[in-house]
Image (tube, rainbow, N blue to C red):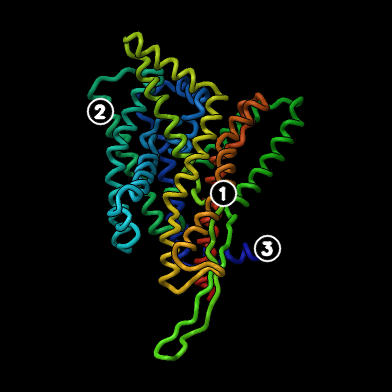
Amino acid sequence: MITTFIHKLKLVFSDKVLRNRVLFVLGALVIFRALASIPIPGVDTARLAEFFANNQFFGMINMFSGGGLSNLSIIMLGVGPYITASIIMQLSTVMSPKMKAMQIEEGEAGKMKFMQYSRYLSVPLAFLQGYGFLALLQNQGVLASMDLMTTLMNVLVIVAGSLLLMWVGELVTEFGIGNGVSLIIFAGIVARLPSAINQLVFSYDASQIPMYIGVLALAVLVTAVVVFMTEAERPIAITYARQARRGNTVGTGTSTYLPLRVNQAGVIPIIFAMSLLLMPRMAAQVLSALHVAYVSGAAQVVSNFLANTAIYAVLYFILVFFFTYFYTAVTFDPDQIATNLQKSGGYIHGLRPGEATAEYLGHVITRITLFGALFLGVIAVLPVGMQLFTGNQTLTIGGTALLIAVSVVLDLVKKVDAQVSVREY
């Protein structure tokens, strides 16, 4: 296995095209990390560190910003607006037949137009998120009070930083290897590891060695489960009938399978749930600063309610579970798959093409999504559960970060293997 890995590594760096793609990815990630270290002016670093230490929500948003939010850099929004815009565009395919036709039926031109609309939508979302973050952080005392022109300038800077990062991600997708946006998030997750290890070393307590060993064993187990669930699929056997033209048989009947992934929705339900839980907290933080007694009082009640760790974990789990089914229903259309199978002469053994096939596929995806929804729900609340169980804020296993990291690494390995295989043959 090690010999095979070394052989593939040599092939990657000996082939000019592959080497250039790898170097392009590395160069883009270096630029990303350099931008993440440039803060906007007027930041109280001590208050900022305290703010992130006490806010689980913003810790997750920091992950999706690639670590840029933790020091309020010029790319503090990261690729968050672009991800949100992509999700909204995906949801629009359910409500608008025209948008659905653009993505599915119009081919490559339709997909390019669909992506362009996502980029356009990212701009107003970046302005809204940028202004919301600045207002919230000013209320928390993390940022100094700013006048209108300073606020507008800072919003323009961080919006430009987010759009620049989106462009870099798309360049990586086109000229590098793997999905550029995913690689940027992955780089942000990895960049936080040294500080997490440093924090763990400084909080080391010899009496807690059994707990450290237990957490390490749990981390290995969770990683194995994440890999298994990410790759898990339910194969549906598909048979293609022989075709006949003018009395002659063309080809023979072939069999293949339709892979239905257990985790069909990926990490999207966690992003949905996080956004939905974040909005009322941000609104409550802003409204609590108003000088209207009943408004600020109600906002404070909402803020305190959502700040309760146990309530947060329960709501988070329920929303992730719900959105897993919701997003799977949006992206997986049994009727469309059954129609495509019928047009291509494929069928599932024992089932009539058309409505019966669609009903069967819907039944199967509903059953296996139950396991995917439970898995994502547990992964989402895993850091909170670890903190409650151990009582140690440093001993947490970032389930969402781990899920993203594993998914990106597996996808990258598959794409590198595909590139190597093409060059070997």
Q: Position of residue 387 (x, y in %)?
A: 62, 27
What's the distance in space between the residues labelled 1 and 3, CA to CA? Answer: 20 Å
Residue to which mark 2 is pinned: 152
Whether 111 is drawn above or below 381: the answer is below
Residue to which mark 3 is pinned: 1
Q: Which mark is residue 406?
A: 1
Amino acid type of the residue that numbered disc 2 sits on in the rendered structure: Leu
Q: Position of residue 180 (x, y in %)?
A: 42, 51
Rendering quarter of residue 195? top right
What's the distance in space between the residues labelled 2 and 3, CA to CA? Answer: 55 Å
Q: Which mark is residue 113?
A: none
What's the distance in space between the residues labelled 2 and 1, CA to CA? Answer: 38 Å
Amino acid type of the residue that numbered disc 1 sits on in the rendered structure: Val
* Local secondary structure at mark 3: loop
* Local secondary structure at mark 1: helix
Residue closer to the observer: 13 or 249:
249
Tell me the mark number nearer the camera, choosing from 1 and 3: 1
Q: Looking at the image, is mark 1 or mark 3 earlier in the sequence?
A: 3
Residue name at image x 52 percent, y 83 percent: 252
Q: Residue furthest bottom?
A: 247
Note whether residue 187 is visible: no
Q: Position of residue 67 (x, y in %)?
A: 46, 36
Residue name at image x 47 percent, y 68 percent: 353
Residue name at image x 43 percent, y 70 percent: 342
Amino acid type of the residue that numbered disc 3 sits on in the rendered structure: Met
Residue closer to the observer: 363 or 372:
363
